[in-house]
Image (cartoon, rainbow, N blue to C red):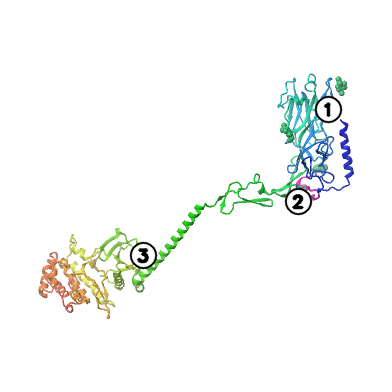
């Protein structure tokens, strides 16, 4: 071995001895932080007190670069990484050379004793073992074990051979002139051994064998390497760790020697050999082996490693990334922020929203207006008065609307329309009378409602209820199935009507009118008695309807000029004087009786001849009997027709005072029925 190399460890040893009394200082600002462009960080250090035991570095002025301390030959350092706990150094190759006697005349096992404190392990992941030669076997060994034929646990190596000078080829390290092999973890040195085989006939192109560890990415075989310089060095990765023979678990209990002194640092067990390494916690960077060595990473300054497509905000140990106001992204870290709503959409939404609000307001005001209108109608239609009359039902507008459709219409005329339908949950049909919208008539309908609400008689159409929430009240009556007497009498398909039935109809109609005239507390005049207003039910029982022109007679108010009667049935006295009395109804009923027994219309000239004042009572009676419908003329005895004629003529008397009362008429007709 060259004596020059022996000098270095001696000097180093002396240096170590000289300073051994100095207490170990973990790190000082006086320590050089680099050498030859290579950063030197604690636990590494140059100079006493600057390094942790086993991590001393020497700045070799001659080489102009850092070297590991305590080695038998300088071991240049290319890189010292705190973050990955690695060092990249140049280690010499092992070799042996043969002379012409086929004997090894010189050799080196490559060992430089770089690992006194055993803080290093040869990286098994980054390095490989390469053997070069044309008839050799090179190997390394590791992990001493006692009591065995072999003193080590592992022997790792490979064999290389070449037949002649042309056997080996560049780039191929596969057993011909060069071989390589993976190494086990835990290797602590680079000591190599060879098995010697004859080099006869090879000395000229392969006089020496070589074996070395090398960065597996950094060595490619060249045939020229068969004659490599024996002083060559190779790049090798070393894994270093705090080799206190303690795991992280254990070291935390021995706080005084714990190397991970920085806040925000973590301990990790070494992946190659015993001990542990320190790392800065997530979000921090720097040197965990010195106090406050781990500092927060400002992720916002490194978008490559810490992406953010929005607004980046650094926090201790982390960072936030949010989209600016008015924009959004499903993942602002990786996907760009887009405006929440484009301006056009905002305007559209604003407009739609505005319109919606306007619509709501308008609708509400319309609804309010409609409500006020309904209330007003209710008041105008006499609602407050009618409400007190609790015999009739007040319907909501919606309740009647389903009935008021064209297909339900069963009658139409000057008064308005009549619909047949069913109320909800009712089995009996009703007739709904919807008057024509005529403000002047509205008051009369209220009148009719009030009148009818007081009338409960089997010969008067029953008013079930009304709806006052409309312009003109809608009236709901019991449905009378056989239609009006007018229709029965004068329809084209003349239904046979015998005398008895006609008398029944006459008598009962008279009863109804009489009831209205006299039997209720406040007498009611009909005002428009005619066959069209006498309805017949399924049994031909007459029911008087249409009290639209009726007036209640009170002591003070027995005079009116607004009754709308019907020409032909109208009391001539009333036409002359404008004074409508109960006798006016009697007159009209006389016309109805005449029509009933003659089956001729009131405007028929024959009927008219009786109504006028051109004849005396006797002639009129005779004329009535002559005009009796032939259908019934033969069925009854002449006395009945005489009596009927008598009643009729009396009812039609132009002298109001000579007309009988309605009750009288009713009684006499009832007598005739019997
Ligand atoms: C070769 O080396 C061996 C061992 O050193 C030595 O004994 C021998 O004399 C050498 N032969 C020649 C020719 O130098
Ligand atoms: C080996 O590493 C050194 C220094 O890192 C570099 O200069 C060289 O190119 C590498 N060689 C190969 C073959 O990768
Ligand atoms: C390391 O630990 C092993 C097993 O725990 C023990 O046998 C050995 O003596 C320890 N070595 C040192 C240097 O503490």
Residue 531: give x, y in percent of width and height. Answer: 21, 67
Q: Which residue bears the numbered disc 1?
A: 107
- Mark 3 closeness class: few <14, some 14–19, many ≥20 residues within 10 Å: some
Q: Element at badge 1?
A: strand
Q: CA distance from mark 2 to mark 1?
A: 49 Å
Viewer-nearest of discs 2 and 3: 2
- Spatial separation of the CA atoms under disc 3 and disc 1: 120 Å
User: Is the residue marked 1 within 8 Å of ligand 1, measured from its CB?
Assistant: no
Q: With respect to residue 84, does 520 lie above or below? A: below
Residue 558 lies left or right of residue 339; in this view the side is left
Residue 292 numbered tag: 2
- Whether residue 175 appears in this view of the structure is yes
The image quadrant where one finds the N terminus is top right
Spot the residue most to the bottom: 555
Looking at the rendered image, the quarter that the C terminus falls into is bottom left
The vertical placement of 487 against 139, above or below, is below
Q: Which residue is mark 3?
A: 397
Residue 250 magenta-drawn? yes
Q: Mark 3 falls on what kind of element? A: helix
The quadrant where ligand 2 appears is: top right
Task: Provide the residue span drawn in magenta.
Answer: 244-264
From the viewer's perspective, is the residue at label 2 or at label 1 nearer? 2
Task: Give the Cα distance between marks 2 and 3.
Answer: 85 Å
Q: Label 2 crowding class (10 Å Cα cut-off): few <14, some 14-19, many 20+?
A: some
Task: Give yes or no for residue 76 being in the magenta stretch.
Answer: no
């Amino acid at each position: 071995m060259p004596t020059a190399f022996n000098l270095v460890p001696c000097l180093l040893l002396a240096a170590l001895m000289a300073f051994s009394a100095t207490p170990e200082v973990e790190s000082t600002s006086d320590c050089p932080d680099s050498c030859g462009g290579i950063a030197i960080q604690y636990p590494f250090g140059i100079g006493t007190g600057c390094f942790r035991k086993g991590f001393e570095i020497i700045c070799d002025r001659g080489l102009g670069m850092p070297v590991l301390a305590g080695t038998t030959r300088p071991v240049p350092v290319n890189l010292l990484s705190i973050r990955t706990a690695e060092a990249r150094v140049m280690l010499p190759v092992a070799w042996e050379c043969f002379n012409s006697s086929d004997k090894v005349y010189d050799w080196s096992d490559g060992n430089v004793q770089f690992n006194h404190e055993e803080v290093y392990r040869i990286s098994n992941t980054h390095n490989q073992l390469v053997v070069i030669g044309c008839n050799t076997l090179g190997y390394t060994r590791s992990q001493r074990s006692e009591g065995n034929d072999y003193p080590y646990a592992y022997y790792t190596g490979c064999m290389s051979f070449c037949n002649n000078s042309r056997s080996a080829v560049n780039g191929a390290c596969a057993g011909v002139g060069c071989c390589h092999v993976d190494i086990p973890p835990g290797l602590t040195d680079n000591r190599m051994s060879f098995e010697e085989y004859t080099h006869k006939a090879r000395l000229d192109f392969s006089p020496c064998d070589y074996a070395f560890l090398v960065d597996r990415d950094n060595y490619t075989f060249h045939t020229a390497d068969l004659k490599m310089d024996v002083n060559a060095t190779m790049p090798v990765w070393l894994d270093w760790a705090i080799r206190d023979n303690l795991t992280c678990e254990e070291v935390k209990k021995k706080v005084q020697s714990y190397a991970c002194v920085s806040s925000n640092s973590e301990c990790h067990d070494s992946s190659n050999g015993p001990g542990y390494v320190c790392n800065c916690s997530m979000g921090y960077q720097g040197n965990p082996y010195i106090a406050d060595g781990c500092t927060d990473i400002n992720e916002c300054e490194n978008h490559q490693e810490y992406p953010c497509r929005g607004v980046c905000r650094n926090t201790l140990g982390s960072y936030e990334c949010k989209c600016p106001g008015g924009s959004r992204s499903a993942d602002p870290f990786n996907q760009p922020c887009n405006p929440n709503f484009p301006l056009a959409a905002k305007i559209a939404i604003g407009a739609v929203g505005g319109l919606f609000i306007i619509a709501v307001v308008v609708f509400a005001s319309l609804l309010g207006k409609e409500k006020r209108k309904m209330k007003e109608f209710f008041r105008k239609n006499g609602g407050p008065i009618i409400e007190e009359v609790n015999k009739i039902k007040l319907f909501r507008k919606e309740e009647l609307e389903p009935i008021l459709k064209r297909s339900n219409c069963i009658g139409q005329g000057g008064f308005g329309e009549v619909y047949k339908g069913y109320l909800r949950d009712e089995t009996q049909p009703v007739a709904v009378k919807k008057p024509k919208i005529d403000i002047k008539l509205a008051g009369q309908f209220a009148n009719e409602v009030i009148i009818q609400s007081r009338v409960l008689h089997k010969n008067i159409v029953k008013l079930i209820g009304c709806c006052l929430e409309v312009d003109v009240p809608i009236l709901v009556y019991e449905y009378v199935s056989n239609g009006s007497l007018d229709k029965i009498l004068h329809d084209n398909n003349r239904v046979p009507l015998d005398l008895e039935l006609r008398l029944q109809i006459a008598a009962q109609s008279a009863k109804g009118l009489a009831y209205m005239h006299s039997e209720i507390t406040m007498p009611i005049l009909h005002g428009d008695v005619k066959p069209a207003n006498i309805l017949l039910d399924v049994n031909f029982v007459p029911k008087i309807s249409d009290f639209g022109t009726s007036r209640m007679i009170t002591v003070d108010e027995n005079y009116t000029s607004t009754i709308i009667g019907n020409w032909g049935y109208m009391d001539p006295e009333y036409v002359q004087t404008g004074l409508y009395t109960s006798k006016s109804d009697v007159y009209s009923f006389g016309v109805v009786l005449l029509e009933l027994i003659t089956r001729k219309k009131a405007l028929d000239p024959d009927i008219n001849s009786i109504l006028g004042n051109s004849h005396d009572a006797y002639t009129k009676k005779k004329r009535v009997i002559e005009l009796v419908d032939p259908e019934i003329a033969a069925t009854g005895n002449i006395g009945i027709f005489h009596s009927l004629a008598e009643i009729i003529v009396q009812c039609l008397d132009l002298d109001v005072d000579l007309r009988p009362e309605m009750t009288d008429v009713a009684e006499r007709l009832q007598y005739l029925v019997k």
